[in-house]
Amino acid sequence: MDNKILGALGENIIISELLYRGWIPQNLNSIVDNSPNVDIVAIKDTTKINFQIKTAKLSQPDVRVGHGKKKQYLNAKVGPKADFLIMVRFENPKNYDVYIVPIEVAEKEIKRCYDLWLERPKLDGKVRSEKFPAHIYFHYNKNRPDESDYTTKWSQYLNAWNLIEPDLQVDSTD
């Protein structure tokens, strides 16, 4: 599947989820192609929240979030800043997982994983290049057994709509 279509599917899943919860969302990418830092702005009553959306297939072991060693991966561009990273992992529009992560938590984890990756030499002993894509990992990796309990790590953010609405008790499977 084309990456632009994959991204658009993830963004539209989140727009549907936000509408279901009473938010008024706007996809900024429909106004400005590749809007910096923020993909969706949502408003409810007097609250406005900015979201950056990353999408991957459930079969992929990770969600790609950038490329190369950087001081900052999310909110790195000039412009509005995201409050949350939402990762959509799906097989089809009826079978998907949504992870709602505070932007600071996601940024810290991306940097930690990238730095760990750089610290480990290649199999031939050579130093790794800083041009490798940055990821958020979801599956066990035999090369990182000490840091591979990602299912547990991210479970607190799975369908964590309560992070944007603490009083909300809606199950997305309704």
Image (cartoon, rainbow, N blue to C red):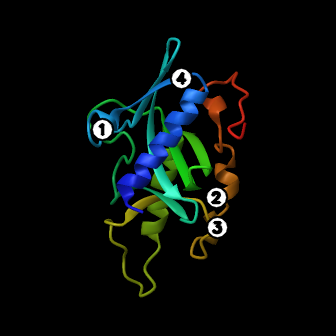
Amino acid bearing label 3: Asp
User: Disc 4 to disc 2, how far (Cα)?
Assistant: 30 Å
Amino acid bearing label 1: Ser
Circle nearer the N terminus (3, 1): 1
Secondary element at image label 2:
helix
Label pair 1/2, CB-CB below 8 angstroms: no
Badge 3 is on which residue?
146
State the mark number for residue 23. 4
Quadrant in which the N terminus is drawn: bottom left
Crowding at dot 4, Cα within 10 Å, few <14 / some 14-19 / many 20+, comes out as some
Does 67 appear above or below 142?
Answer: above
Quadrant in which the C terminus is drawn: top right
Secondary element at image label 4:
loop
User: Disc 3 to disc 4, how far (Cα)?
Assistant: 40 Å
Q: Where does residue 129 sit, x and y in percent of width and height?
A: 33, 71
Q: Where does residue 88 sit, x and y in percent of width and height?
A: 54, 49
User: Disc 2 to disc 3, how far (Cα)?
Assistant: 11 Å
Badge 2 is on which residue?
150
Badge 1 is on which residue?
35
Image depth: mark 4 or mark 2 in front: 4
Image depth: mark 4 or mark 1 in front: 4
Circle nearer the N terminus (3, 4): 4
Residue found 48% across the figure and 47% down from its top: 10
The image quadrant of residue 80 is top left
- In the rendered image, is residue 89 in sight? yes
* Extreme residue in the bottom direction: 124
Secondary element at image label 1:
loop
Crowding at dot 3, Cα within 10 Å, few <14 / some 14-19 / many 20+, comes out as few
Asked if residue 131 lies left or right of residue 45, the reply is left
